[in-house]
Amino acid sequence: MGRKPNKLKTTNPFLEAIAFVGTALKEQGTHYETHLYLNNNWAIANNGVLAIGCPISWPSLATPNYSMFSNALIKCGVDWELVKTDNTLDIHAGKFRAIVPCCDPILITLPTIDPPITAISNAFRDALGKVAMLANDNAQSVIEASILMNGQSIVGTDRTIIIEAWHGCDLPPGLALPKAFAVALCKIAKNLKAFGYSDNSATFYFEDPNNNDPNTLTGNEPWVKTQLFADSWPDINAILNRGSNPLPVPKGIWDGLAAVKSFSNNNLVYFDSDILCSSSDSNMGARYEVAGLPKGPIFNIKYLEIMKNLATSVDFFAGNATMWFGDACRGAIANRVT
């Protein structure tokens, strides 16, 4: 009864596209947080902050529950058939069948993506990965809740540590990215290709596997769009450009940190002359000899562990902060006085 069902054979690229778009969705939430929009050979997800689109081989309108749809496709193997009805997608593969409910398409808002204006490379994602963990979705200030696009670098801070990482792409300064975008982008393995932005959003385009020309866009490039914070970051140059005299990170400091950190009862470690200590009391906790370690600095262990993965040189007494430098990155940690 009614109109003829729409059938289409699909293979692995379809599942890969659905998984890519589903990065913006979750199992529980509102319809726009849990359902895909499929139409005109595109799959789109839009959770209100993050939107993702990818070309697919499916021309008809359908809005399936993402979790159920992707789980069904995974169970189908490499060959399956989709049958569209008014309110469901019916998935067949051999003896397996799943009926996935669809929501009313009006419940999903389609984003308007920003036109591309400049090229971008995977170096942007690499830099983002060095600072994204510092942002906090629940923070009250923009500098703690976001990551700053700072021209050819990316900056993140939690007010105790600040990190700047360079990517070298010619991008605009002053754009504050949500952490949700940073987390999503760092999970995507596709190669970045182009970038566009407006007053309140930014769109990142990825390579079209069918287009080998790095200088042109076909209109079939997958993309990720993010909302931007309206508030601006304060000037951070005074913090990052402070005078310093960095020296190579003392050899053995990371072995020492691994040895003593479990003995700390307050998540702090203390520097004595050539000794790393888990306690300010020399008669308590654990100690580890580290030649060249200066007396005085006190660190929260988590900040030293961040520095461990990035720093090659350090100045522990750059004013009221520790300044460190690494491969295409630098950072400052506010010094503790007690």
Image: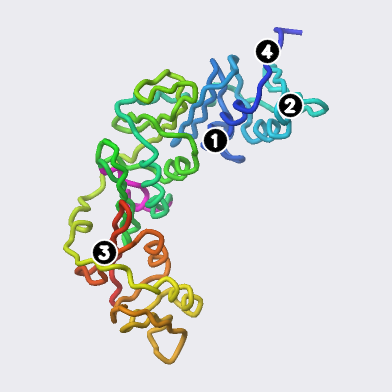
Q: Nearer the viewer, residue 69 or 206?
A: 206
Helix, strand or loop at label 3? It is strand
Query: Which picture quadrant has residue 34?
Result: top right
Q: Nearer the viewer, mark 4 or mark 2?
A: 4
Q: Residues within 10 Å of mark 2 (few under 14, many from 20)?
A: some
Q: Earlier in the sequence, mark 3 or mark 2?
A: 2
Between the residue at mark 3 and the residue at mark 2, the CA separation in whole angstroms equals: 57 Å
State yes or no: residue 285 in magenta: no
Between the residue at mark 4 and the residue at mark 2, the CA separation in whole angstroms equals: 15 Å
Q: Considering only vertical position in the picture, is 240 above or below 287?
A: above
Residue labelled with disc 2: 99
Residue labelled with disc 1: 33
Quadrant of the image containing the C terminus:
bottom left
Tag shown at residue 323:
3
Residue labelled with disc 4: 6
Between the residue at mark 1 and the residue at mark 2, the CA separation in whole angstroms equals: 20 Å
Q: Earlier in the sequence, mark 4 or mark 2?
A: 4
Helix, strand or loop at label 4? It is strand
Q: Considering only vertical position in the picture, is 255 above or below 48?
A: below
Residue 88 percent coordinates (x, y): 69, 22
